[in-house]
Image: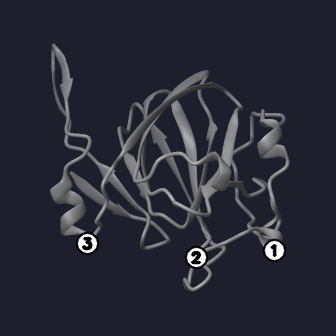
Amino acid sequence: MRIIETAISDVVCFEPRVHADARGFFMETWRKSWFDDLGIHAEFVQENHSQSVKGVLRGLHYQLVKPQGKLVRVIRGEVFDVAVDLRRASTSFGSWVGVHLSADNKRSMWIPPGFAHGFLVLSAETEFVYKCTDYYAPEHDRTLLWNDPALGIDWPLDDIRAPTLSDKDLRGALLSAADVY
């Protein structure tokens, strides 16, 4: 496993060692000791699996109470995955980091509690799997507006006319009005 640092030090990517032969491949996708070695203390309590088509943008989601840390990866297709720091006391508050995750590169990304998270589907169809450190709590669910000019997220929309969003994501809050940590 190789650790890949991002522009926000608390957000980390993992690139597994893939053992491939004529039968297929094998890889470890998560190991507690990797997190321990980085000083990340996370206990996963829920795993989610979503399927989306090209142009779907999900996010930017977070839970104000019971914030979730997430270990995210793609098992089919490709996404542009984004984490936005909403921890007011952080030196990177309001900053974002974006990473291409795909079934081909097999990378995963750790997004700590205190971040909003979202992704844009870049392939015809994508399956996205993620572990969470706390349970989904709809009463505490919040959405940050995906295209807030204050964030300046550089979504790769080159061959996507307009992303497909849920009503909830269309009504996301601007950072200046958002509930933050």
Residue to which mark 1 is pinned: 176
Query: Callout 1: helix, strand or loop?
Result: helix
Tell me the colour scheme of the image: one colour
The three-letter amino acid code for the residue at tag 2 is: Arg
Residue type at numbered disc 3:
Gly
Query: Does residue 136 lie above or below 63 as drawn?
Result: above
Mark 3 Cα shell of 10 Å, populated few (<14), some (14-19), many (≥20): few
Q: Residue at x 25, y 69 (%)?
A: 38
Residue 179 drawn at (x, y percent): 72, 69
Q: CA distance from mark 3 to mark 2?
A: 19 Å
Q: Is residue 179 left or right of residue 132?
A: right
Q: Residue placed farthest to the front in the image?
A: 139
Q: Mark 3 or mark 1: which comes first in sequence?
A: 3
State the separation of the CA atoms marked 3 and 1: 31 Å
- Tell me the number on the disc at residue 124: none
Q: Which residue is mark 2?
A: 87
Are the residues tagged 3 and 1 within 8 Å (C-beta)?
no
Q: Position of residue 45 (x, y in %)?
A: 36, 46
Give the SS element for disc 3. loop
Q: Examine the image and state in which quarter residue 180 appears.
A: bottom right
Which image quarter holds the C terminus? bottom right
Residue bearing mark 3: 39
Left or right, residue 47 beside residue 83: left
What amino acid is labelled 1 in the image?
Answer: Ser
**Residues tagged 3 and 2 counted as in contact (Cβ below 8 A):** no
